[in-house]
Image (tube, rainbow, N blue to C red):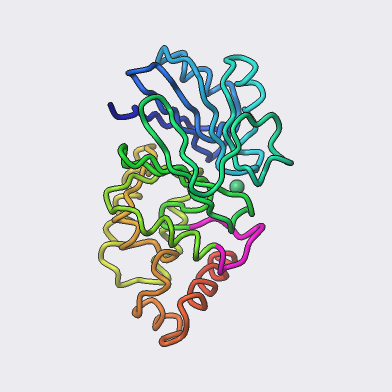
Amino acid sequence: MALEIRLVPLLSDNYGYLLHDAGTGETAIVDPSEAAPVLAALDAEGWKLSHILNTHHHPDHIGGNAELKAATGARIAAPKADLHRIPDVDVPLAEGDRYRVGGSEARIFAVPGHTSGHIAFWFEADQALFSGDTLFSLGCGRLFEGTPEEMWRSLGKLRALPDATRVYCGHEYTQSNARFALTIEPGNAALEARAAEIAALRAAGKPTIPTNLGVEKATNPFLRADVPAVQAALGLADRPAIETFAAIRRGKDNF
Ligand SMILES: [Zn+2]
């Protein structure tokens, strides 16, 4: 049975996600910035929290851990590499590990770049990827603790997943990402269509998440640094893709 997934808006532009397995009653929260809205969402659904999943150590992804654990007894699964900076972890996770929420199993990817310990959770059978602040819709995370090379390699792992994968990321940054993406590829019809869809969703007060990995492959400039047209647009034709990736990341930092 597939996981039921509920988006929980947190802080100003963070998203947490409740994952519920109806068969076993197990429920997880991904990246709880704060506890109160998560507890309210659990209450509204009649679900009991059993797992807290963290993609990385930033406070807006773990801020609700302690209060949620105290209130529910849920166990915390988080990056093994962040044990020194995420308190009270029960299950340390690293590349290649598997983690079960009820009847669904996630494969863990190490995706350094935004932070050195960042992980992503891929629930293959559910076609759902929780990418934290590594892959955003039309964007990627800032390189606080990593190099462009690391981030490009990390995004490559995620890009290799099936097109039908739904991508659940850590923030609602999509509209500003779309404005930047259009400066890189103004003639990309798929990007123009996605930008129009995003504008309509935001005008209606709706989230742009989940996005779809097939759409991201066709529109997200950070997944397209090895597309010849993108490289040429940046004056980097016939250069290694990493140079285009680094140039796009620098451009976004200054956008
Ligand atoms: Zn972060």
The percent coordinates of residue 171 (x first, y second) are: 50, 44
Tell me which corner region of the image, top left, top right, bottom left or bottom right, holds residue 44: top left
The percent coordinates of residue 228 (x first, y second) are: 35, 80
Residue 13 lies in the magenta stretch: no
Would residue 152 appear left or right of 88 to someone viewing this image?
A: left
- Magenta residues, start to end: 140-150
Residue shown at 41% from the left, 57% from the top: 138
Residue shown at 69% from the left, 29% from the top: 88
Would residue 176 appear left or right of 60 to someone viewing this image?
A: left
Residue shown at 54% from the left, 62% from the top: 151
Would residue 238 appear left or right of 87 to someone viewing this image?
A: left
Of 192 and 80, which appears nearest the observer? 80
Q: Quadrant of the N terminus?
A: top left
In the figure, 244 relative to 77: above or below?
below
Of 37 and 213, which appears nearest the observer? 213
Residue shown at 51% from the left, 45% from the top: 132
The percent coordinates of residue 72 (x first, y second) are: 57, 15
Tell me which corner region of the image, top left, top right, bottom left or bottom right, holds residue 63: top right
Name the dominant secondary structure of the magenta segment: loop
Total label count? 0
In the figure, 250 relative to 96: above or below?
below
The percent coordinates of residue 234 (x first, y second) are: 45, 80
Of 49 and 193, which appears nearest the observer? 49
Of 207 and 67, which appears nearest the observer? 67
Q: Quadrant of the C terminus?
A: bottom right
